[in-house]
Image (tube, rainbow, N blue to C red):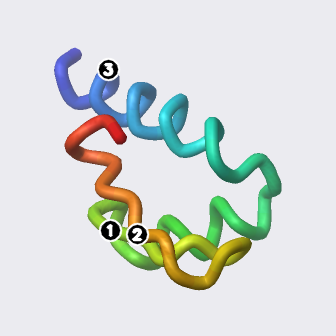
Amino acid sequence: MAISTCVMLKIKLFYRYHNTVLDYIMYQKLGMKQVKCPHTKKEVFNIEAGL
């Protein structure tokens, strides 16, 4: 169950910044670790850390 909770948490945190399906698909391809914000082109979020 821990894995499911972790994934749901990541998705929840992710959608605080990006709420389009395309952004989410692109984000998944980056491995859910760090992602360069497609809107600001400079901010890097570490979803694992809960930012």
Q: Is residue 33 left or right of residue 10?
A: left
- Tag on residue 44? 2
Query: CB under 8 Å between callouts 1 and 2?
Result: yes
- Tag on residue 46? none
Secondary structure at numbered mark 2: strand
Q: Which quadrant would residue 31 be assigned to in this image?
A: bottom left
Q: Residue furthest top?
A: 1
Does residue 18 sit above or below 35 in this rendering? above
Q: Is residue 34 left or right of residue 15?
A: left
Does residue 38 sit above or below 28 in this rendering? below
Closer to the chain start, of discs 1 and 2, is 1
Q: Nearer the viewer, residue 1 or 13?
A: 13
Please give the name of the residue rendered at 39% of the width and 59% of the height, measured from the top-left corner: 45
Quadrant occupied by the C terminus: top left
* Disc nearest the viewer among 3 and 1: 1
Closer to the chain start, of discs 3 and 2, is 3
Secondary structure at numbered mark 3: helix
* Disc nearest the viewer among 3 and 2: 2
Please give the name of the residue rendered at 37% of the width and 35% of the height, measured from the top-left corner: 7
- Return the x and y of residue 29 as percentages of the image width and height: 47, 77
Query: CB under 8 Å between callouts 3 and 1?
Result: no
Q: Is residue 36 left or right of residue 34?
A: right
| Amino acid type, mark 1 | Gln
Question: Real-space Cα distance between discs 3 and 2?
Answer: 23 Å
On the image, numbered disc 3 is attached to which residue?
5
Please give the name of the residue rendered at 53% of the width and 68% of the height, measured from the top-left corner: 27
| Amino acid type, mark 3 | Thr
| Amino acid type, mark 2 | Val
Crowding at mark 2 (Cα within 10 Å: few <14, some 14-19, many 20+): some
On the image, numbered disc 1 is attached to which residue?
34
Question: Real-space Cα distance between discs 1 and 2?
Answer: 6 Å
